Image: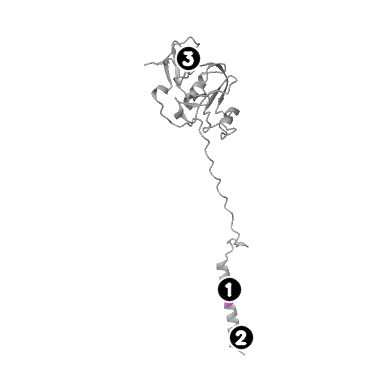
Amino acid sequence: MFNPFRLNTRFAAATLGALVIGATAFSAPATAAPLPLFPFFLPQIEAAPPPVAAAPREEEDRSVELPARLRRQVVNYYTREAPGTIIIDTPNTYLYLVLGNGQAMRYGIGIGRDGFTWSGTQTITRKAEWPAWTPPPEMIARQPYLPRHMAGGPGNPLGARAMYLGGTIYRIHGTNAPETIGTRVSSGCLRLTNADVTDLYSRVNVGTKVIVLPMTDRRADLGRTIR
């Protein structure tokens, strides 16, 4: 006997099954990647490394316009000293490098302040580029705030080059304060601009004779600019 209720039930079940299969086919195709098991664990993104600071340039020097008389220049300079000799004209704040034939290269310098000038003859016993600075005990006693040691570099008061004089504590060196050239400011050392001390350093060798004239020798400037 025909039972319409049983037919409707089978038809409904078949229809429901087809819908479920179709939905599954469209929502999860065979080529789709499987979903992560723990979607809240996100992949980590590697951070870019911090930028590296540029090393200070060796030729770094504060730009200061020196008076014309203190700028490096070749001058007429008559002396019996051999070419290559350095003569420090303390009263006039000049350093002369004797060239011969009545000429010298003249540099403006900073000298010792009152009570710290000296005179005599020494030789260059050591040369150093971007020297470290270790203030001597005598200087520490006078200025206890000074560092006990400072690595070489643009901020070092010895500047770009240093030439050490005999067994003394004195040096011919550069400076990080070029505005002090032509003044009496040091504890006895002789300072040039970094550009000038680098030039002088390239012209002299260990063993070079250095003559430091006394402050009391107030002769007129012996070096006349070549015009």
Q: Is residue 133 at least partly visible in the picture?
A: no
Residue 71 is situated, as x and y percent measured from the top left of the image, at 42, 23
**Screen quadrant of the N terminus:** bottom right
Name the element at disc 2: helix
Disc 2/disc 1 C-alpha distance (Å): 21 Å
Q: Name the residue under label 2.
A: 6
Mark 2 Cα shell of 10 Å, populated few (<14), some (14-19), many (≥20)? few
Q: Name the residue type under label 2.
A: Arg
Q: Name the residue under label 3.
A: 98
Residue 38 is situated, as x and y percent measured from the top left of the image, at 62, 62
Q: Name the residue type under label 1.
A: Val
The residue depicted at 56 percent of the width and 71 percent of the height is 23
Residue 15 is situated, as x and y percent measured from the top left of the image, at 57, 78
Q: Above or below — where is 52 with respect to 32? A: above
Name the element at disc 3: strand
Q: Is residue 75 left or right of residue 23?
A: left
Q: What stretch is highlighted in magenta?
A: 16-22
Closer to the camera, 99 or 108? 108
Q: Which numbered marker is on residue 5?
A: none
Q: Name the residue under label 1.
A: 20
Q: Which of marks 3 and 2 is nearer the N terminus?
A: 2
**Magenta stretch: includes residue 50:** no
Q: In which quarter of the image is residue 120?
A: top right
Which mark lies nearer to you, 3 or 1? 3
Q: Which of marks 2 and 1 is nearer the N terminus?
A: 2
**Colouring style:** one colour
